[in-house]
């Protein structure tokens, strides 16, 4: 993929030019479509189990491609989850909290990981980033509770974004 992974463009360092809002929106809608395909349109339900910015590859037109299916599992049609025998697979910060308690990956746990990716794309911050006493997900929840959700939007965008989409 000529444009590498999404995380390179979001977190490539101080010299990296940030993705504009329209590209960010295009990427997340493409990833949402891919996840919908895996969960609802493929012959079997597939749980990706490792959805994160570094596993979203970008072609020459910045069309996203979901990659790294090494942890993915196809579910029998009558099943809704995949139980891991030894430990929960995935990447910290993207694993839904209930997975640690239940030891199962579900379509909903993929959706949680996608939500974390959305927060990364909107905020330009990684899930483990400390913002005061919080990490990304908890920080955004605190902003939401205080009616200041737009404070989470990436400052590098300089206000050039669609408020309703953000």
Image (spheres, helix red, strand yellow):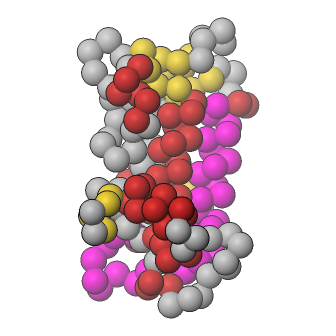
Instruction: State left or right for residue 24 relative to residue 41.
Output: left
Task: State the predominant SS element of the stretch in magenta.
Answer: helix
The magenta segment is 10-39
Is residue 85 depicted above or below 154 in this figure? above
Q: On the rendered image, what quadrant is the C terminus found in?
A: bottom right
Pinpoint residue 1: horizontal percent, then vertical percent. 45, 59
Is residue 37 on the magenta stretch? yes
Pinpoint residue 86: horizontal percent, then vertical percent. 26, 15
Residue closer to the observer: 130 or 73: 130
Q: Residue at left 40%, top 55%?
A: 138
Is residue 108 depicted above or below 24 in this figure? above
Is residue 128 depicted above or below 3 in this figure? above
Specify the quadrant of the image occupied by residue 12: bottom left
Q: Is residue 35 in view? A: yes
How many circles with numbers are drawn on the protein? 0
Q: Residue at left 58%, top 70%?
A: 147
Q: Residue at left 42%, top 49%?
A: 52
Residue closer to the observer: 22 or 124: 124
Q: Residue at left 56%, top 88%?
A: 159
Specify the quadrant of the image occupied by residue 136: bottom left
Furthest-front residue in this view: 146
Residue closer to the observer: 30 or 3: 30
Pinpoint residue 35: horizontal percent, then vertical percent. 61, 41
Q: Is residue 53 in view? A: no
Is residue 5 depicted above or below 77 in this figure? below
Pinpoint residue 27: horizontal percent, then vertical percent. 58, 62
Instruction: State left or right for residue 73 relative to residue 166.
Output: left
Is residue 2 on the magenta stretch? no
Furthest-bottom residue in this view: 158
């Amino acid at each position: 993929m000529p444009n590498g992974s999404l995380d390179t463009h979001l977190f490539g360092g101080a010299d990296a030019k940030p993705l504009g809002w329209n590209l960010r929106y295009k990427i997340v809608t493409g990833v949402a479509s891919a996840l919908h395909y895996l969960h609802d349109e493929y012959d079997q339900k597939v749980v990706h189990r490792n959805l994160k910015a570094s596993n979203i590859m970008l072609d020459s037109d910045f069309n996203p491609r979901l990659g790294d299916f090494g942890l993915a599992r196809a579910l029998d049609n009558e099943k809704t989850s995949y139980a891991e025998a030894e430990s929960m697979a995935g990447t910290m910060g993207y694993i839904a909290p209930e997975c640690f308690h239940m030891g199962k990956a579900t379509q909903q746990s993929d959706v949680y990981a996608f939500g974390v990716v959305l927060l990364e794309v909107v905020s330009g911050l990684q899930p483990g980033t400390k913002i005061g006493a919080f990490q990304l997900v908890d920080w955004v929840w605190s902003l939401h509770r205080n009616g200041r959700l737009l404070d989470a939007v990436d400052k590098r965008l300089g206000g050039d974004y669609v408020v309703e989409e953000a």
